[in-house]
Image: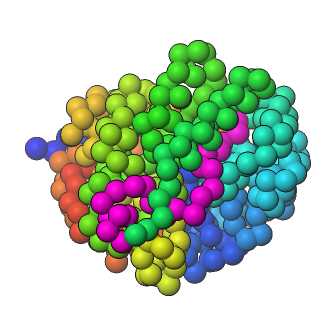
């Protein structure tokens, strides 16, 4: 039986468009079309382009064009995303940055991160961290990693980074958002920080909610991302945290040309495309499987993301989204508006899809 719902416009606070740098993977125009088709009214783009988004001209360029969704760029925490020197946060904020992030890279220098968070706090802006201490690993410890003798990324790589960030949030009072969280231990740190009253939020991606490294059977780089997929216990805790309102949703839409994803876990790039599948996947996991209230599910897509975006009133205006939860379809990457096809959902069938976005 078809069930149709109407909500305020959904917002994805974590997407990658690849221009400048790799426009054959995604441009702002193609990414915005993918977002529109996926049911989103607004997206926040990450600054890990080439060159990086650490200047006012980059922010201006990201918003040029007549897009079918609102495109709001985030800006770098550090100059060049190198982690060595804090970017000109004040100018970037004035230019309209959504928040500050070096996504794709962890700001490892504690002093640099503390200085950035202190300045962001003065601006009333959020810092969003790719909280993963660098390692040589390519996935979490699991049967596939052991069978193929692949180097692993320990859960502590994320847990230690989140603990560091929360400690700096406590010192500076800066709003902290943990991007693409993947481990039960890190979720517990975020829960505790929220109970303490700290301004800490975090996001779960559709792929970390649906898949587990324990179920991987093949050397398929469409399942390679950073942070890597967690195990069954991690996945269960992520789902509990979303249901409890501890975590919001975000896609981490990460397009790549086929040549960057065709050589297995060891050498392929991290990331998958997800804008056109996210509503379907999160509804299936959280509402159909976990029994989450549909209104609470929707708030994790439209209300909670506004907490971390500066001047969030500019996001969507009166835009609405309508979703049909009784319209089963199969994911077909050949029909994507995105220019890339690195998607582990291909061939899977889901029941809930956006019907239209009203502007």
In percent of the image, x 64 and y 24: which residue is there? 199
Of residues 301 and 181, which is closer to you in this image? 181
Look at 60% across and 16% down and name the residue there. 197
Q: Is residue 342 left or right of residue 142?
A: right
Nearest the camera: 213 or 16? 213
* Residue 209 lies in the magenta-colored region: no
Q: 77 left or right of 140?
A: right
Please provide the residue range marked out in magenta.
Answer: 126-148
> Residue at coordinates 80% horizontally, 35% vertically from top-left?
114
| Residue 354 as seen in the image, left or right of residue 266 | left
Whether residue 142 appears in magenta in the rendering, the answer is: yes
On the question of residue 135 being in view, the answer is yes
The image quarter containing residue 119 is top right
x then y, percent, for residue 289: 21, 40
Residue situated furthest bottom in the rendering: 259
Query: Given the current orientation, which residue lies at the most extreme left position?
Result: 1
How far across and how far down the image is residue 344, in percent? 34, 66
Name the colour scheme.
Answer: rainbow
Instruction: Identify the residue at horizontal 35%, vertical 64% (top origin).
Output: 146
Above or below: residue 51 compared with residue 9: below
Give how far across and how far down residue 200 sits, in percent: 60, 28
Q: From this viewpoint, which residue is outermost toward the top?
A: 196
Q: Where is residue 308 in the image (x, y as percent from the top left)?
A: 63, 35
In which quarter of the view is residue 242 placed? top left
Residue 305 quadrant: top right
Please state if 163 lies on the left or on the right of 231 as rendered.
right
């Amino acid at each position: 039986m078809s069930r149709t719902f109407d909500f305020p416009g959904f917002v994805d606070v974590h997407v990658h468009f690849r221009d400048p740098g790799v426009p054959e993977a995604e441009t702002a125009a193609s990414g915005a079309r993918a977002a529109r088709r996926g049911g989103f009214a607004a997206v926040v783009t990450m600054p890990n382009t080439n060159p990086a988004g650490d200047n006012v001209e980059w922010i201006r360029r990201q918003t040029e064009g007549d897009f079918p969704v609102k495109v709001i760029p985030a800006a770098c925490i550090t100059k060049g995303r190198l982690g060595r020197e804090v970017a000109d946060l004040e100018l970037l904020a004035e230019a309209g940055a959504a928040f500050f992030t070096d996504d794709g890279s962890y700001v490892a220098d504690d002093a640099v991160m503390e200085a950035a968070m202190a300045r962001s706090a003065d601006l009333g802006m959020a810092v969003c961290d790719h909280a993963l201490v660098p390692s040589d690993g390519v996935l979490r410890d699991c049967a596939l990693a052991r069978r193929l003798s692949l180097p692993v990324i320990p859960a502590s790589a994320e847990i230690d980074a989140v603990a560091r960030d929360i400690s700096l949030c406590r010192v500076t009072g800066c709003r902290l958002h943990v991007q693409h969280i993947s481990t039960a231990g890190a979720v517990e740190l975020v829960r505790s920080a929220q109970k303490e009253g700290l301004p800490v939020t975090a996001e779960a991606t559709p792929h970390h909610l649906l898949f587990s490294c324990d179920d991987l059977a093949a050397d398929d780089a469409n399942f390679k991302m950073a942070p890597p997929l967690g195990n069954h216990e991690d996945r269960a805790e992520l789902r509990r945290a979303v249901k409890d309102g501890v975590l919001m949703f975000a896609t981490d839409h990460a397009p790549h040309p086929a040549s960057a994803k065709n050589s297995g876990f060891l050498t392929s790039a991290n990331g998958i495309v997800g804008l056109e599948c996210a509503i379907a996947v999160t509804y299936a996991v959280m509402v159909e499987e976990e029994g989450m209230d549909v209104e609470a599910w929707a708030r994790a897509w439209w209300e909670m993301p506004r907490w971390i975006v500066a001047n969030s009133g500019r996001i969507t205006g009166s835009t609405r989204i309508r979703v049909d939860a009784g319209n089963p379809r199969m994911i077909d990457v050949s029909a994507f508006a995105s220019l890339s096809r690195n998607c582990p959902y291909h061939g899977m069938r889901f029941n809930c899809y956006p019907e239209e976005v009203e502007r």
